Image (cartoon, rainbow, N blue to C red):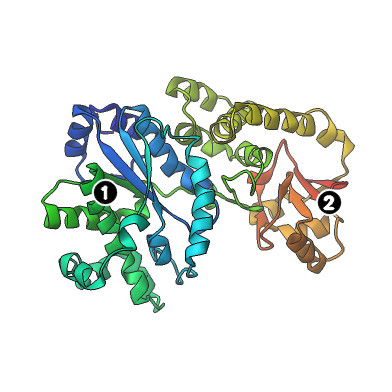
Amino acid sequence: MTAFKSDFLRILSERGFVHQISDPEGLDAAAAKGPISAYIGFDATASSLHAGSLIQIMMLHWMQKTGHKPIALMGGGTSMVGDPSFKDDARKLLTVDDIERNLAGIRKVFANYLDFGGSASMLNNADWLLGLNYLEFLRDVGRHFSVNRMLSFDSVKTRLDREQSLSFLEFNYMILQAYDFVELNKRTGCVLQMGGSDQWGNIVNGIDLGHRMSNVQLYALTSPLLTTASGGKMGKTASGAVWLNADLMSAYEFWQFWRNTEDADVERFLKLYTTLPLPEIAKLAALGGAEINEAKKVLATEVTAMLHGRAAAEAASETARKTFEEGSLASDLPSIALPRAEFDEGLGVLTAFVRAGLVPSTGEARRQVKAGGLRVNDMLVSDERATLSPSDLVDGAIKLSFGKKKHVLLRPE
């Protein structure tokens, strides 16, 4: 691990946020010398961000905590194009009204992590992208991009290698993102763009464009793309996406998601998604056997408190304690045992409800999913193709609910 001089890079490195840095020594020296400004872009593809975006939000949070100036950039302009990076198909085109509605939902989250009355700011790239003159943009910006080089980036190459169409509209996305970086540097002095590792090529394009257009030194920092210990996509469950907005997922459901963290992920998630000191995290991670569940509860409460507030997090914890620990799960609910191999292989959620006797057929289970009638561990099921695995076990069981009164526990044997 590189010994960084700046608190900003040292903390990000120690807590597992760093995947790549374009110029580690140069960025570290700049951050150690005085406050720098950095941004992360968030496109408005839905009315809420999900848990997969939390690692980026936490990077901005730590940036402000260490005395720097984070920028949350809303993609009001780039959302009209859609990022094609590593996508199999083109994103659905959004209308201006769609984007505005989505932005309104997304903005709600950031005030829980950033102090906009202090050094943090929120900008919208629609402010400079929507007014561009196309011919001037081609002449002043487009001439700096090599199509040969653009085709070599993995985000584009993988799409073409699969012989999947890449529209000219999408092909422009990386140019617009690069231009965002240059524009933010001119407007705010921003010198660093952060993002997930899948954004490396796009960010490096911005560094190169800044050098060509303004002869300025810009930097890139990416975080690792996270999966769970069992290989699942971060922010996805049997219930669908783990949304950050309370109107799409309650504080209790959000708490339960983190409580269900796999044992092997507890320490990593405590470092990334909470602000607990590292020595305290080390003590929690050292807990073995059933005691690791106490660490999971701390993780769930701390992450939920940052998003929904301490009172909501503690209320969720108390609700879970009454539901899962005071006997209602242990003795009050009917229980069905299934071979552990079925859980290890991934038990289809529709099949699980049929095996539990809560619905007569997978067709009826599918209809109930669409009607919002099925829950797993009190979290609404929205994806009929989801599977249940050992990571969904809470104190040795998975709670299936049909409506408010029919509940069954599935236990592996």
Whichever of labels 1 and 2 marks the residue nearer the N terminus, that label is 1
At label 1, counting other C-alpha atoms closer than 10 Å, the crowd grade (few under 14, some 14-19, many 20 or more) is many
Q: How many marks?
A: 2
The furthest residue to the left: 215
Query: Residue 142, how many percent across, how many down?
Result: 20, 68
Measure the C-alpha gap from mark 1 to mark 2. Answer: 50 Å
Q: Nearer the viewer, residue 355 or 197?
A: 197
At label 2, counting other C-alpha atoms closer than 10 Å, the crowd grade (few under 14, some 14-19, many 20 or more) is few
* Quarter of the figure with residue 363: bottom right
**Residue at the image point whose x is 57% and y is 36% from the top:** 263
**Residue at the image point whose x is 46% and y is 28% from the top:** 275
Q: Nearer the viewer, residue 180 or 266?
A: 180
Callout 2, which amino acid?
A: Gly
Callout 1, which amino acid?
A: Leu
Q: Which numbered dot is residue 184? A: 1
Question: Which residue was labeled with disc 2?
Answer: 403
Q: Nearer the viewer, residue 264 or 193?
A: 193
Query: Residue 369, how many percent across, how many down?
Result: 74, 60
**Quadrant (top left/top right/bottom left/bottom right) for the C terminus:** top right
